[in-house]
Image (cartoon, helix red, strand yellow):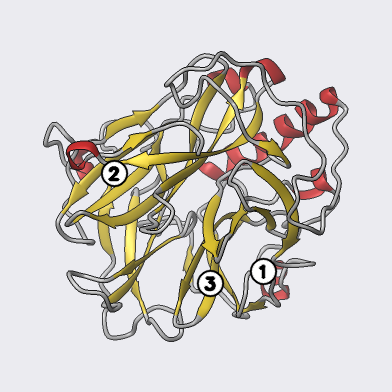
């Protein structure tokens, strides 16, 4: 199955889990810890999934992305739809310590009209990516129709993370039935090359179908660069039923470009059948080729697994890697609680690079 079908199943599962806990969503307006959710009971360990340390508005978080602005951290994620009483808002969480999280806003109050025109009946926007370039915050996001390749990547911008957010008014990239790719799960790499100034801005995207692709963006407008129309093919899972690869995150570190992906199935109606895991490959060009630690190409089903199901939490994925020379590198992702009927939780973990390969640590 493709991501659209599985994402719909996630919403149903999350809603059931939430109702079973009696959780009532509270819209928070500040960056304090807010109302603390019930957190899972775990045994401390060096395993990143064995201990849960985050507090506050940390459940019903899927496909998170993170950025630091000054001393504040901001997480955006897939909108749970009517589960949280709002539709298509792309919620924003904030924290000053990366542990205590509160809802502090949203990108939209309603789904932009161009999306409801293209996709009548749409109630959720997915998998946002937040970045900062050309003096503006950019949020790329997904709008799609369940069970199809009819998908779009949109863009909203703002002068600060507090907004106001202005939508681009139309798709940055689209796919239709029969396209080589599926235009969902956007990710932005601001590429400095070997220097300290921006050389390129890359949009990496894709889910199932042909796998992971990439286009170059205009660093001023944030739209597709008309002087480079190459659609780079970065990763795929040939020979694996359904080509289960999505949720790419591309970063530059220590002379390499690292391509993180989510492999396996996500968001099934029965969460115990989810097989999501986070894998990585690296290369010396942002356009690939990328290989894993064994030298297997990412275009040939390669990928070194850096995190998979363990103990209380299962199916980690939807990852986003944030490199920060000031406060340290982070990886954020969601994982499902086996103790709470698959309720999805936010993780924000340290990321280090021994031997120039990533190692997921515990919470900061």
Tag 1, which secondary structure? helix
Q: Name the foreground residue: 310 vs 12.
A: 310
Q: Quadrant of residue 326?
A: bottom left
Task: Work out whether residue 14 or residue 22 is closer to the camera in this orientation and state it.
Answer: 22
Q: Nearer the viewer, residue 83 or 136?
A: 136
Is 228 left, or right, of 342 in this rendering?
A: left
**Label 2, on which residue?**
236
Residue 218: x and y, percent?
37, 82
CB-based contact (under 8 Å), mark 1 and mark 2 = no
Compared across the picture, whether 123 is left or right of 271 comes to: right
* Crowd band around label 2 with a 10 angstrom C-alpha radius: few (<14), some (14–19), many (20+): many
Please tell me how crowded label 3 is: few (under 14), some (14-19), or many (20+) other residues with Cα within 10 Å: many
Q: Residue 300 placed where, x, y %? A: 19, 39
The tally of labels here is 3
Residue 360 located left or right of residue 127: left
CA–CA distance in space, label 3 to label 1 = 18 Å
Task: Give the SS element for disc 2.
Answer: loop
Query: Of tags 3 and 2, which is closer to the observer?
Result: 3
Q: Residue at x 48, y 61 (%)?
A: 176
Q: Mark 1 — residue?
A: 115
Quadrant of the rendered image containing residue 39: top right
Quadrant housing residue 187: bottom left
Classify mark 3: helix, strand or loop.
strand
Q: Position of residue 305 (x, y in %)?
A: 31, 30
């Amino acid at each position: 199955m493709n991501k659209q079908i599985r994402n719909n199943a996630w919403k149903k599962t999350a809603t059931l889990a939430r109702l079973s806990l009696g959780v009532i969503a509270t819209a928070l307006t500040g960056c304090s810890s807010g109302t603390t959710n019930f957190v899972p009971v775990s045994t401390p360990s060096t395993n990143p999934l064995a201990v849960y340390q985050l507090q506050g508005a940390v459940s019903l978080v899927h496909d998170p992305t993170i950025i630091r602005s000054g001393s504040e951290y901001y997480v955006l994620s897939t909108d749970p739809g009517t589960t949280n009483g709002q539709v298509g808002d792309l919620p924003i969480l904030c924290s000053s310590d990366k542990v205590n999280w509160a809802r502090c806003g949203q990108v939209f109050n309603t789904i932009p009209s161009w999306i409801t025109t293209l996709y009548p009946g749409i109630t959720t926007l997915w998998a946002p990516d937040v970045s900062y370039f050309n003096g503006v915050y950019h949020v790329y996001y997904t709008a799609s129709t369940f069970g199809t390749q009819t998908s779009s990547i949109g863009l909203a911008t703002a002068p600060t993370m507090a907004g106001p957010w202005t939508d681009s008014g139309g798709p940055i990239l689209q796919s239709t039935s029969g396209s080589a790719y599926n235009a969902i799960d956007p990710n932005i790499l601001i590429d400095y090359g070997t220097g300290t100034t921006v050389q390129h801005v890359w949009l990496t995207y894709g889910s199932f179908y042909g796998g992971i692709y990439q286009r170059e963006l205009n660093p001023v407008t944030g739209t597709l660069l008309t002087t480079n129309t190459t659609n780079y093919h970065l990763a795929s899972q040939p020979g694996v039923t359904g080509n289960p690869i999505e949720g790419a995150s591309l970063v530059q570190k220590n002379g390499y470009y690292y391509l993180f992906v989510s492999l396996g199935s996500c968001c099934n109606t029965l969460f115990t059948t989810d097989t999501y895991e986070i894998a990585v490959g690296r290369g010396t060009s942002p356009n690939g080729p990328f290989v894993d630690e064994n030298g297997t190409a990412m275009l040939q089903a390669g990928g070194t697994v850096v995190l998979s199901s363990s103990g209380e939490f299962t199916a980690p994925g939807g990852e986003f890697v944030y490199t920060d020379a000031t406060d340290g590198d982070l990886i954020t992702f969601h994982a499902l609680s086996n103790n709470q009927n698959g309720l999805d939780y936010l993780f924000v973990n340290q990321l280090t690079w021994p031997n120039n390969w990533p190692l997921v640590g515990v919470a900061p």
